[in-house]
Every structure is written in C-alpha cells, then in structure tokens.
Amino acid sequence: MKKFFFLAASFAALTLSSCSITLPVAVSSNPIGSKMGEAEAQVFLHVLSFGGDASIMKAAKKGGITRVATVDMKVSDILGILQTYKTIVTGE
C-alpha cells in the first residue's frame, strides 16, 4: 500500500510540475513608460511550433509602444513537452 501511495504521489507531482523563468533580454536609455505589450508562441517537444509570434516587434505593436525601454523573455516548460515563450516589452 505504501508503494501505491508513493507511486501515486510521484505521478501527481510529475504531471503537475512545470518550470518557468523570466530573463532580461535588452534595456535601452528610453524611459520605461506606462505601456506594456506581450507576444507569445508555443512549441511542442522543442520542435513543432503552433504558428505563434513571440517577437519584440509583435509585442511592441500589441502594446502600442513606439519607443522600447525594456525587453524580457518568459519561458515556461511543462514536462519538456509543451514550451511557451512570451516576450514582454515596456516603453512609451
């Protein structure tokens, strides 16, 4: 019975786990401003893309930003199967 609970707990922890990290990509001398834009793309097994666009240009356009101040990249990974790349742009 102990083995069953250990296996069930291990399986639950493995299937519910994910990893996420946010890294700075670029900084300019432009003021930070109050606007923020995000662009996202999803990838399956690090190979197959679902047609998303996580570019800096797309994030700036979505946020209505003409002068980019900072660019951050957030990468999320679920069991090495599904990865999400999100570009976060701030500026004016």
Image: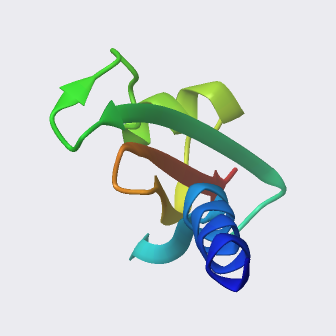
Dividing the picture into quadrants, the one containing residue 54 is top left
Indicate the quadrant containing the N terminus: top left, top right, bottom left or bottom right.
Answer: bottom right
User: What coloring was used for the rendering?
Assistant: rainbow
Image vertical order of residue 85 relative to residue 12, above or below: above
Camera-nearest residue between 6 and 52: 6
Camera-nearest residue between 12 and 21: 12
Q: List the single residue furthest toward the top.
A: 51
Q: List the single residue furthest toward the left.
A: 47
Q: Find residue 84 and report its horizontal and vertical position in percent.
A: 47, 44
Q: Is residue 75 left or right of residue 48?
A: right
Residue at image coords 49%, 50%: 87
Image vertical order of residue 33 relative to residue 7, above or below: above
Q: List the single residue furthest toward the right.
A: 34
Q: Find residue 26 and report its horizontal and vertical position in percent.
A: 39, 72
Q: Is residue 56 left or right of residue 15?
A: left
Q: Find residue 68 and report its horizontal and vertical position in percent.
A: 52, 55
Residue at image coords 36%, 44%: 81
Camera-nearest residue between 20 and 70: 20
Image vertical order of residue 17 relative to residue 62, above or below: below
Camera-nearest residue between 60 and 84: 84
Residue at image coords 31%, 33%: 44
Residue at image coords 55%, 65%: 14
User: Is there any visible trace of residue 18 in the rendered image?
Assistant: yes
Q: Is residue 46 left or right of residue 34?
A: left
User: Is there any visible trace of residue 30 in the rendered image?
Assistant: no
Q: Find residue 15 and report its horizontal and vertical position in percent.
A: 58, 55
Counting labels gives 0
